[in-house]
Image (cartoon, rainbow, N blue to C red):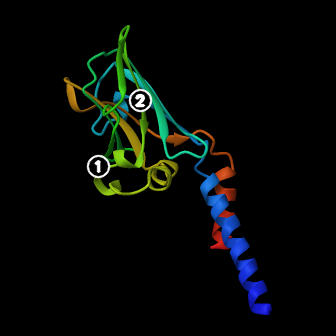
């Protein structure tokens, strides 16, 4: 009987730990403010932009919106792995299967990221665990290319806009169970 109670308690702890970990990625929001001075090496671009990403509850999709002001000549929009000031590998093509519209003096891009969109070192991994973890750690950035700067016209580091103790509390709870 003692062994059954221990296994039951362990199972409940494991289940609650898993619940905490999985809800940590649901409903999360990330943003990036993009400019030429964040590109490595920096550009003297007058173009700027914003990108927002959000997970949806009970879903395996990250929805995104990107607005680029000052250019309708966007040739590439990607998420790369890399910390501020570092160049890194491309892991998501944000123009693939997206809606790209030229707007007055700019470009608007909307779309969804699923696990099948991941490439490079994240290929075959899960979008709501592996990509989100990199985004939460501050090790991803959005890079926008144009014909004038094919290796990056503007760039912005992705940051968790709801990073108010929730992440550290959830990590502490999940680590204590695992």
Which label was assigned to residue 167?
none
Is 54 located above or below residue 1 in the figure? above
Is 60 located above or below residue 98 in the figure? below
Q: Quadrant of the N terminus?
A: bottom right
At 36% across and 31% down in the image, what residue appears? Answer: 37
- The x and y percentages for residue 116 are 36, 48
Q: Quadrant of the C terminus?
A: bottom right
User: Could you tell whether 112 is left or right of 119 in the image?
Assistant: right
At 30% across and 15% down in the image, what residue appears? Answer: 72
Name the mark nearer the viewer: 2 or 1.
Answer: 1
Which label was assigned to residue 89?
1
At 35% across and 35% down in the image, what residue appears? Answer: 94
User: Could you tell whether 63 is left or right of 149 in the image?
Assistant: right
Mark 2: few/some/many CA within 10 Å (<14, 14-19, 20+): many
Q: Which residue is mark 2?
A: 34
User: Could you tell whether 21 is left or right of 87 in the image?
Assistant: right
- The x and y percentages for residue 174 are 65, 65
Mark 1: few/some/many CA within 10 Å (<14, 14-19, 20+): some
Is 105 located above or below residue 137 in the figure? above
Q: Nearer the viewer, residue 150 or 12?
A: 12
At 19% across and 24% down in the image, what residue appears? Answer: 147
- The x and y percentages for residue 22 are 60, 56
């Amino acid at each position: 009987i003692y062994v059954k109670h221990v296994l039951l308690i362990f199972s409940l702890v494991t289940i609650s730990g898993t619940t905490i970990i999985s809800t940590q990625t649901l409903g999360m929001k990330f943003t990036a403010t993009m400019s030429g001075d964040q590109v490595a090496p920096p550009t003297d671009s007058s173009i700027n932009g914003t990108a927002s990403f959000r997970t949806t509850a009970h879903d395996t999709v990250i929805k995104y919106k990107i607005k680029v002001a000052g250019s309708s000549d966007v040739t590439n929009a990607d998420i790369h792995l890399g910390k501020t000031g570092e160049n890194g590998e491309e892991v998501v093509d944000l123009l693939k299967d997206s809606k790209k519209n030229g707007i007055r003096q700019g470009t608007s891009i909307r779309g969804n990221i699923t696990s099948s969109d991941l490439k490079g070192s994240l290929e075959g991994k899960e979008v709501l665990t592996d990509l989100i973890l990199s985004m939460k750690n501050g090790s991803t950035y959005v890079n926008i290319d144009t014909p004038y700067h094919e290796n990056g016209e503007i760039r912005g580091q992705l940051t968790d806009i709801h990073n108010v103790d929730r992440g550290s509390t959830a990590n502490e709870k999940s680590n204590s169970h695992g």
